[in-house]
Image (tube, rainbow, N blue to C red):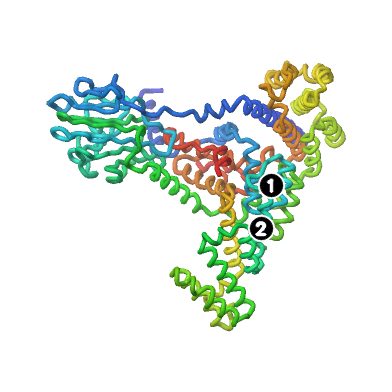
Amino acid sequence: MSMFRVFISQLAEIDTMSTSKKVITREEWEKKLNDVKIRKEDMNKLVMNFLVTEGYVEAAERFKMESGTEPDIDLATITDRMAVKKAVQCGNVEDAIEKVNDLNPEILDTNPQLFFHLQQQRLIELIRNGKVEEALEFAQEELAPRGEENQSFLEELERTVALLAFEDVSNCPVGELLDISQRLKTASEVNAAILTSQSHEKDPKLPSLLKMLIWAQNQLDEKAAYPRIKDLSTAILEDPAV
Amino acid sequence: MGNNQQETRLSLSGRSEEEILRLVLNRRRCNEGEKVIEEEEEQEQVPTHLNTINSSGGFLIVSPDKLSVQYTNVHLHGHDVGVVQANCPAPTKCLVYYFEIYVKNAGAKGQIAIGFTNEHFKMRRQPGWETNSYGYHGDDGLLYRGQGKGENFGPTFTSGDTIGGGINYASQEFFFTKNGKLVGNPYKDVKGPLFPTVAVHSQNEEVNINFGQQRFVFDIEAFAQEERLKQHMSIEKVLLPLNVSHWIVRSYLLHYGYQDTLNSYDMASKSTLPPIAVVQENGFSEHGNMFALNHRKLLRQLIRSGDIDSAFGKLREWYPQIIQNDMSIICFLLHCQKFIELVQVGELEEAVIYARAELAKFFEIASLAGLVQDCIALLAYEEPSKSPVGYLLGMGQREVAADAVNIMVLLEDPQSCTKSHLEMLLRQLTACCLEKRAINGDQGEAFQLQSVVQSS
């Protein structure tokens, strides 16, 4: 190779270094993946944590038997928590409040927002069932006084009472309150509060790790081209676009 | 065509051998080491005092405790600065590094500086005047970055002020504080390793340095916490496909043949998952492997209960090809387990006979010799469970044998994969985090699945 060509090829090298990202081939990347140490025990714990937090009590029991993984919470408490959650999901809010208080009265005492949301849900259920008088009485006696403590409670209360003004609630601006998703929202709020009271994280770890994977891949994209996983559900590695 | 198939088959068996060997060796390594983990998490050295050997000794005096400096000369020019670095560079495998100085006496001109310099720094110059050095100067409040000219940065500082210098590895920025408050805009230009550095340059200037031996004036914990929260928020903003965690858990249970768990899980999710999941299910149902689920479950149960004879029996009945070759790793692993179970129940004589018949021949295979040796060593101890090879007697070792058999059965289905989706995702996550750190010059906190799993 002549001196000139050496010089040119070095220039080209410098050029690619400065303008393009680091390219990691599939072969190199797979080697890196293989070098990662993942312990089965840790994966089992992740799965157990998911089952427990999401309330799959029977599955958690079976998983303990089948894999020997110890749950990070007393499994009996899951049953109680799920009963509360289910009660809210079915619209039996009074029942749910009673169950929460049986479990630990401090949960609602120390969490006025949660208590308000449960009462609001109770009002929604009364309106849903066409019990107008009972609904009004409940709103005035139980909810309005709480609204005085907190401006946002008052706004929520007014929004909810607005349901009474419409004959056809399916078509009114606050109709979403009657949607099943409102129940699910309230239910998950109670669920989180109970978990917190049991000094357990309110969310399972697995979804956070999956989010972290997407985030880490996006960050690495800025600096390198490498095989990435696009579809989490198949976990298939896709070749880098070079 | 037929030829092709043959080839696939061969490479598959090679892959499974490799995979199982990895399982086995991993387990051994895990035993040896908590050591391994400690090695990886090895604590970096943290600056604790000033380096008195490599300081511009002619111009300043370092106190005997090596935590304060004083300029005793009359300064004449730009090359007689009293500079001193910490005893070692700031650690890089963390989220933030921070140290503080207290200006006890601003001296004649208050030409005090705090900053970071690299190992080649000329020890008679102000930090920031030379390339790869950075300094916040007290007399003009300017930030100097590698040249003689400074930039507008923060307030000036003088006697009685506490000034801090820090590196935020998450954002790759330097930051400085005055009396407990951040000053100026952080500067993005961190190329480690960097030494915490202090300079004095006029008569009677005296500065105390706090490397963390005393409480900092600035709330560095809150700063780090906020930085963590920022990162956490940007991660939590990521949207996941609906119910993807649910399906990943399901395919994990399928992969390892945890059939009872799976049944309960499916029963429960029928009533709790929103109806939209049913549509999703069609899309996902092909993921995760139903193959031989019941066989795999039973084999796992047998091995977990220590009944290796029955496991051999079932394999002979259902998948004779898997254990056809008595010198294969899977046979080796099951023989080891059988031996271990014999030791476990105290039938040592029978264990010896079994070892001679089935284990001795594996000594010649280099990659397996270690495990054979560990097994036989069980015989040497009166209380084997308390011995260094006691790890073999635990449930963990049965689990390894069960996982190995599970993989072998799974591979009877040509579409199978030797790893669960969850494992592949976690590997990808770890590799991405490692790579990102490597590109950043190994700066910042390392990602460790174990610590995520164990945190609560």
State which mark lies toward you, 2 or 1. Answer: 2
Q: Amino acid at mark 1?
A: Ser
* Residue B377 x %, y %: 72, 18
Between residue A35 and residue B182, name the one nearer to us. Answer: B182
The residue under label 1 is: B251
Quadrant of image for the N terminus of chain A: top left
Q: Chain of mark 2?
A: A
Q: Chain of mark 1?
A: B
Tag count: 2
The residue under label 2 is: A82
Q: Estimate how packed mark 2 is, as few (under 14), some (14 to 19) or many (20 or more) residues with alpha carbons within 10 Å.
A: some
Between residue B220 and residue B274, name the one nearer to us. Answer: B220
Q: Estimate how packed mark 1 is, as few (under 14), some (14 to 19) or many (20 or more) residues with alpha carbons within 10 Å.
A: many
Alpha carbon separation for disc pair 2 and 1: 24 Å
Regarding residue B133, the answer to whether it shows in the image is yes
Q: Is residue B112 above or below residue B361?
A: below
* Residue B397 x %, y %: 71, 30
In this image, B314 relative to B73: left or right? right
Q: Amino acid at mark 2?
A: Met
- The structure residue drawn at horizontal position 51% and vertical position 38%, both measured from the top left corner, is B447
Tell me which corner region of the image, top left, top right, bottom left or bottom right, holds residue B136.
top left
* Residue A107 x %, y %: 56, 58
In this image, B204 relative to A227: left or right? left
Where disc 1 sits, the SS reads helix
- The structure residue drawn at horizontal position 46% and vertical position 51%, both measured from the top left corner, is B233
Regarding residue B11, the answer to whether it shows in the image is no
Tell me which corner region of the image, top left, top right, bottom left or bottom right, holds residue B430.
top right
- The structure residue drawn at horizontal position 38% and vertical position 40%, both measured from the top left corner, is B168
* Residue B283 x %, y %: 67, 55
In this image, A83 relative to B443: left or right? right
Q: Is residue B161 above or below residue A109?
A: above
